[in-house]
Amino acid sequence: MWRAIASNALTLFIVALVVVAGILAWGRRTYDGPGPLAQAVCFKVEKGASLSQVSRALEDQGVVRDARIFRIGTEYSEKSAKLKFGSYLIEPAASMADVAGALTAGGQSTCGREVNFRIGVATAEVILRELDPAANRYVEVVRFDPAAAVKPPEYVEAAKSADLRWRITLAEGVTSWAVIQELRAADFLSGDVEDIPPEGSLSPDSYEVEKGADLKALVAEMEARQAATLAELWAGKAEGLPYKTPEEAMIMASIVEKETGVAEERPQVASVFLNRLAKGMKLQTDPTVIYGVTKGQAPLGRGLRQSELRRETPYNTYVIDGMPPTPIANPGRLSIEAALHPAATDYLYFVADGTGGHAFATTLEEHNKNVAKWREIEATQGGQDQGGVQGN
């Protein structure tokens, strides 16, 4: 009798183990398997929310099938204490494991609204945009001048949100003076800088910041990125270049940056100026002359006058020999690469060709023909600046 009871108990125990194992296996498959989402959503984790609250919200919004399984699986994987406040993009059919990973990964929000403070060569603008989860692209909400006395109500309201992402973007070719002036107008930064950073020392890049970030620390990060880029590229520079220091390469890079916005022709532009230096010719580049007039503190807003082309300044490359004493802007990585890896050409001249790029020439005769073609195009376009270098 006792043997029968023991046998039945053992059987029941084994059955229970099988049932429990089956439940665990089902739970694991449910936790790791595809989720119910048909299209991406932006899920927000409220500040201070518990795992139970988040689990229920996920189930209510159709992100997961079962809040209890999500909670148990997240606790079992030791992620329950790592929930991050913010808004996160959840992809279609994301498993519970994927969702838990998205909500506990480091860093800022991956969706929701973002402010991009863009500093361009001539102007600055603030763009508030919002991620469309279904299309996985940002949609602009409002755009405005950061110097505006009255900010758009959409921006004012969005700025109150704790999970709003903040980004600063510097365009290639912007001057250090312009960067600092515009950053001082950013109402989401704090502090100030005492001096304008040296020209060329700031990296044109995108910087994700937190609201209230220190301006001085941000500028230090911009300088650190540019210094790292220059050091990296200088270490692998081509042989036979005339630069004695990395700073001289940065001067050339800034000239290349201001002369063309076409990435593919930057090595050719660099070759023109290096070829001219090698032959003892003056660089004769308008952007340096303009910098001598404006000191980088504002766009010239007009064509150069003949008196300005004749006036002797340290930056007038129609008058001085060699390069100016400092960079004339903050060049991007591609322009630095071009200065340190110029194309192998015999070009000595270039002029705008009407397509946004330039026509290059080896001889003055060929260059004059290119200039004549540009003059014809220029006449139909209202007398734009021709750019490029002139003949001696």
Image (cartoon, rainbow, N blue to C red):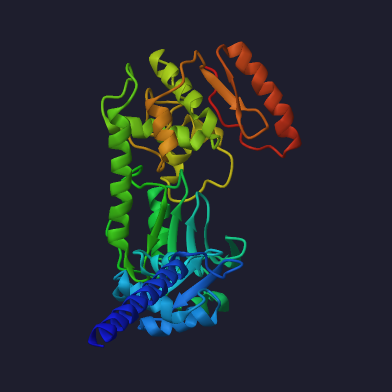
Quadrant occupied by the N terminus: bottom left
Residue nearer the viewer, 71 or 266: 71
Residue 186 visible to an observer of this rendering: no
Of all residues, the one furthest to the right in this rendering is: 380
In the rendered image, which quarter is residue 75 located in?
A: bottom left
Q: Is residue 174 left or right of residue 349?
A: left
Whether residue 359 can be seen here: yes
- Quadrant of res 364: top right
25 relative to 195 in the view: left or right: right
**What is the x, y in percent for residue 369?**
67, 17
**In this picture, is 304 found above or below 70?**
above
Residue drawn at the location 50% of the way across and 67% of the way down: 90
Does 240 appear above or below 146? Answer: above
Q: Position of residue 39 (x, y in %)?
A: 60, 66
Q: Residue at x 41, y 45 (%)?
A: 295
Q: What residue is rendered at 53% in x and 68% in y?
A: 35
Seen in the image, is 252 located left or right of residue 365?
left
Q: What percent of the width, then of the height, locates residue 158?
A: 50, 76
How many marks can you see? 0
Position of 194 relative to 334 (above/below): below
* Residue 286 vs residue 75, the one in the foreground: 75
**Residue 124 pos. (x, y %):** 51, 58
Outermost residue on the left side: it is 2
Point 28% across, 54% down: residue: 220
Compared with 247, 276 (above or below) is: above
